[in-house]
Amino acid sequence: MMADQDAMELVRGSVVTHRRRCGKPNCRCADGQALHESTVLSYSEGGRSRLLTLPADQVAAVRAATERYRVRRQRLEADGQAGLETLVARFAPGGRR
Ligand SMILES: [Zn+2]
């Protein structure tokens, strides 16, 4: 259990809710109102988009982990950009200072 929680610190992907009909004519979803909902993690792997159906009791934790990932990635990109700009300013010919 502890290992699972550690693994959920950061998750790459987006949590999205799908609503659909199952196709059974006498199901509650047949009227197009009470559709079946499933919450999935959408992520890409090897250039392909993939979906992972999430257990209901995991949705909040996974969503929070994807948000932490987004924040951390934005910070990483900003730090990398700042470092790049510093390097360019210092060493580019005709230097921007
Ligand atoms: Zn149905």
Image: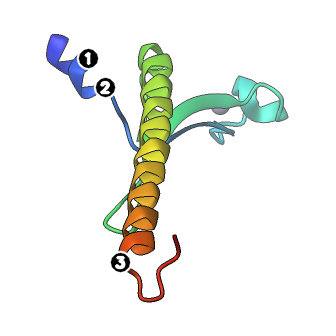
User: For residue 91, which numbered disc appears in the image?
Assistant: 3
Residue 73 or 79: which is nearer the viewer? 79
Could you tell me which residue is drawn at 15 percent across and 18 percent down?
A: 3
**Residue type at tag 1:** Gln
Q: Which residue is mark 1?
A: 5
The residue drawn where x is 31% and y is 66% is 46
Residue located beneath label 2 in the image: 8
| Place of residue 53 in the rendered image (x, y in percent of width and height, measured from the top left) | 44, 35
Sequence-first disc among 3 and 1 = 1
Mark 3 or mark 2, which has the lower sequence index?
2
Q: Secondary structure at mark 3?
A: helix
Q: Residue furthest left?
A: 3
Tags 2 and 1 in contact by the CB under 8 Å rule?
yes
**Crowding near the residue tagged with mark 2, few <14, some 14–19, many ≥20 C-alpha atoms within 10 Å:** some
Tell me, yes or no, if residue 89 can be seen here.
yes
Residue 27 lies left or right of residue 10; in this view the side is right
Q: Residue at x 42, y 38 (%)?
A: 72
Mark 3–mark 1 Cα distance, whole angstroms, equals: 44 Å
Q: Find numbered disc 2 in the image and state the secondary structure of the residue it sits on.
A: loop
